[in-house]
Amino acid sequence: MHCPFCRSEDTKVIDSRTNDDGTQVRRRRQCVDCSRRFTTTENAMLLVIKRNGVVESFDRSKIINGVRKACQGRPVTEADLAVLAQRVEEALRLEGLAEIDAHDVGLAVLTPLRELDEVAYLRYASVYRSFDSLEDFEAEISLLRAGLVGDSAAAYAAEDFISVGDRDGSAS
């Protein structure tokens, strides 16, 4: 790290802390040559690969805006949405990947949204999973009533969604 005052390359870290949401590391440094102190912040990049192949930086506000539509008329505050977006980002960062598919971002929204508000979850899931019939909604409501939560519920819901959508009897 170069000292911003004397451009020396010899600096030492005095203190390191993460910010409240854990996405940044703040380091207090001191130059060995001129003894002046300065602060640096470090962010790990999280990139989203969209369906069309375009890669862009992860943006919490996009999560909030997408979920806000599903929460219209529900008792969900802006603070709740901010916490949900933070939880989604934390879950994605725990995957340890620098790039993540946009579809996986949508999947990461489902569990915290289900815990926040089941009606908003159902609205979001109906669009995200492209519900085509009343049976699709009924199957998802059955999962909610059964209390299935997490990755196993998503896998079960995906299986059920496929079999519900195939009403000609060929579903296995």
Image (spheres, grey):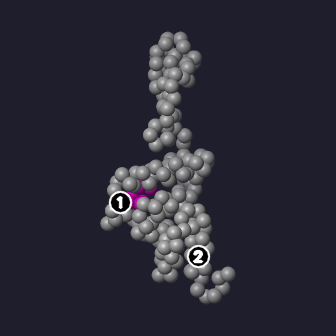
Magenta segment, prevailing SS (helix, strand or loop)? helix
> Looking at numbered disc 2 in the image, what kind of residue is underneath it?
Asp
Q: CA distance from mark 2 to mark 1?
A: 29 Å
Mark 1 burial class by Cα count in 10 Å: few <14, some 14-19, many 20+ = some
Q: Measuring 46% from the left and 49% from the top, which residue is drawn there?
A: 86
Residue 171 showing in the rendered view: yes
Q: Quadrant of residue 72?
A: bottom left
Left or right placement of residue 152 versus residue 66 in this view? right
Which secondary structure, mark 2?
helix
Q: Quadrant of residue 122?
A: bottom left
> Which span is picked out in magenta?
62-68
Q: Measuring 41% from the left and 64% from the top, which residue is drawn there?
A: 117
Which residue ends up furthest to the right in the rendered image?
172
x, y percentage for residue 127?
46, 69
The mark found on residue 76 in the picture is 1
Residue pointed to by mark 2? 160
- Residue 11 forms part of the magenta stretch: no
